[in-house]
Image: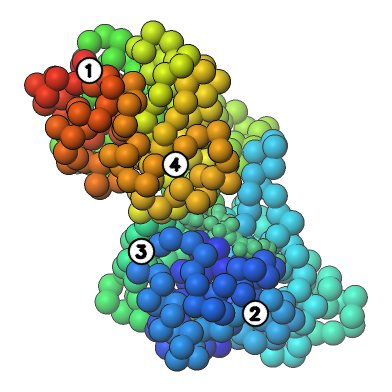
């Protein structure tokens, strides 16, 4: 199949490359000229495990091409994915300007051929209907006719596991009206659905809602665990003991039950706020949805306060930080908890020496030279008054504790992801602070 993509970010590039890997001919378009220039040189602008090989192979073999020419991309595909960003406006609603600029470019170039425009970006409920009308108006203004369909196909990939999520998705969600378009989408995803991964066809609004529902649900679990952790901490219970009992309950399940410094990234914060904003606009009292993000942001501040309080103030302290990215296996710093935590430490007069295996370059765009960037995890510890773990990269889980003890000026660890055991840390002579744990 001939497939076009608008947007070559985390979602667009991964999906475009994976569809090319399945044998399709893919043309991916982005307005970011430097990104496209790098991609044409075989350079991958983001870190995502396994992506580089797939992009390189398919580019070399001619199945994956890149362009900045929107008209060329609009004309190329029988199926056109829109995977541009939908960042948050100040009021929580998503900024739709990238969506509509891509949609307008597609509409301007529609001819008589049947086309499917797939909205893969996370967009508010009702967007597909608006896009359908917008393109119909464009055609009417030109006095032309074209058979097209707007399909909602939200993306559920997780950064860090994006390739596996494409090939082995829990589900594929498709909102569409026209049968010929549903058949074509079924054909497009057939290599993935054939081994048994389910595809759900539904109306566009339900498909759009499915994405917000999933992210809100997952974010709610994290915020609820964090609130339980706060209560546990105050009352002398240990949230890790409590978590095990919850995980064993089949009605609850074991995923997304970890307390820590909260969630971040380009999706949960933005999507939860967007759903809350949609509900507000519809006059719905969605108090539970509103509380999720508030709890999440409080969690970051509480953790920073805990550090400062237990160091008897941060003025003049050197604090080592392990992990900056919003989660392991990505270089993505969007809405990373590290931002607020580090800013609070700096505001309290501390200096910060940070290490992240992948996100240092992205972090520099945020912190500049306000913090220092260590070349490896142990170098960050030299002469520090404490270690703060913010992102649970695998290599931080079993460090050389003796080396840590030697390098740190004070053997104090603030573990924002509960990756260490308090009893073991005590045995090793560390003062240890987790989240919701007995210390
Ligand atoms: P991103 O910011 O990494 O990439 C978006 C890309 O779109 C950028 O490269 C930008 O230059 C490009 N772009 C903007 N306007 C364009 C236009 N008119 N034509 C062509 N390119 C254009 O964003 P992302 O993280 O890939 O997210 C994309 C969408 O997918 C968002 O709606 C997001 O909520 C959703 N989503 C993201 C993830 C994730 O893990 N990142 C997961 C599921 C869904």
Distance between mark 4 and mark 2 Cα atoms: 35 Å
Asked if disc 1 and disc 3 are in contact, CB closer than 8 Å, the reply is: no
Q: Earlier in the sequence, mark 1 or mark 3?
A: 3
Left or right of 394 on screen, residue 11: right
Disc nearest the viewer among 1 and 3:
1
As helix, strand or loop, the secondary structure at mark 2 comes to strand
Query: How many residues crowd mark 2 within 10 Å: few (<14), some (14–19), many (20+)?
Result: many
Disc nearest the viewer among 4 and 1:
4
Q: Relative to 332, is 275 above or below?
A: above
Q: Relative to 60, is 130 above or below?
A: above
Where's the C terminus, which quadrant? top left
- Residue for badge 3: 49
Nearer the observer, 2 or 305? 305
Asked if disc 3 and disc 2 are in contact, CB closer than 8 Å, the reply is: no
Q: Relative to 95, is 106 above or below?
A: below
- Residue for badge 2: 67
- Residue for badge 4: 373
Distance between mark 4 and mark 1 Cα atoms: 25 Å
Q: Relative to 277, is 38 above or below?
A: below
As helix, strand or loop, the secondary structure at mark 4 comes to strand
Distance between mark 1 and mark 2 Cα atoms: 54 Å
As helix, strand or loop, the secondary structure at mark 3 comes to loop
Residue shown at the point (45%, 77%) measured from the top left: 55
Q: Earlier in the sequence, mark 4 or mark 3?
A: 3
- Residue for badge 1: 431
As helix, strand or loop, the secondary structure at mark 1 comes to strand
Which quarter of the picture shows residue 47?
A: bottom left
Left or right of 142 on screen, residue 94: left
């Amino acid at each position: 199949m001939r497939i076009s993509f608008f947007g070559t970010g985390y979602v667009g590039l991964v999906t475009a490359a994976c569809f090319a890997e399945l044998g399709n001919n893919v043309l991916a378009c982005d307005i970011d000229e430097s990104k496209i220039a790098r991609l044409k040189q075989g350079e991958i602008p983001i870190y995502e495990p396994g992506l580089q090989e797939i992009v390189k192979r398919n580019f070399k073999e001619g199945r994956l091409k890149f362009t900045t020419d929107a008209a060329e991309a609009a004309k190329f595909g029988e199926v056109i994915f829109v995977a541009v960003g939908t960042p948050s406006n100040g009021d929580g609603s998503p900024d739709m300007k990238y969506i509509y600029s891509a949609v307008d470019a597609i509409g301007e170039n529609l001819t008589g051929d049947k086309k499917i425009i797939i909205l893969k970006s996370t967009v508010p409920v009702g967007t597909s209907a608006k896009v359908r009308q917008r393109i119909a108006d464009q055609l009417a203004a030109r006095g032309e006719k074209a058979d097209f369909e707007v399909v909602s196909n939200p993306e559920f990939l997780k950064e860090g596991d994006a390739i596996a999520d494409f090939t082995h998705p829990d589900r594929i969600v498709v909102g569409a009206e026209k049968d010929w378009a549903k058949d074509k989408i079924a054909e497009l995803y057939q290599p993935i659905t054939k081994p048994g991964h389910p595809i759900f066809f539904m109306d566009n609004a339900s498909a759009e809602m499915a994405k917000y529902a999933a992210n809100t649900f997952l974010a709610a679990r994290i915020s609820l665990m964090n609130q339980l952790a706060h209560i546990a901490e105050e009352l002398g219970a240990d949230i890790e003991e409590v978590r095990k009992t919850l995980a064993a309950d089949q009605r609850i399940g074991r995923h997304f039950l970890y307390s820590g410094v909260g969630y971040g990234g380009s999706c949960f914060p933005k999507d939860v706020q967007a759903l809350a904003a949609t509900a507000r606009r519809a006059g719905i009292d969605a108090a539970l949805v509103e509380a999720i993000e508030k709890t999440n942001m409080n969690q970051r501040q509480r953790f920073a306060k805990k550090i400062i309080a237990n160091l008897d103030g941060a003025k003049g302290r050197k604090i080592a930080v392990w992990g900056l990215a919003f989660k392991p296996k990505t270089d993505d710093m969007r809405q990373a908890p590290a931002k607020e935590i580090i800013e609070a430490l700096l505001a309290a007069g501390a200096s910060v020496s940070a290490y992240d295996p992948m996100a240092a370059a992205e972090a520099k765009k945020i912190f500049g030279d306000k913090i220092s960037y260590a070349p490896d995890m142990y170098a960050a510890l030299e002469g520090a008054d404490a270690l703060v773990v913010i992102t649970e990269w695998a290599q931080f889980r079993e460090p050389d504790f003796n080396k840590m003890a030697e390098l740190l000026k004070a053997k104090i660890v603030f573990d924002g992801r509960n990756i260490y055991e308090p009893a073991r840390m005590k045995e090793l002579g560390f003062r240890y602070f987790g989240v919701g744990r007995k210390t």
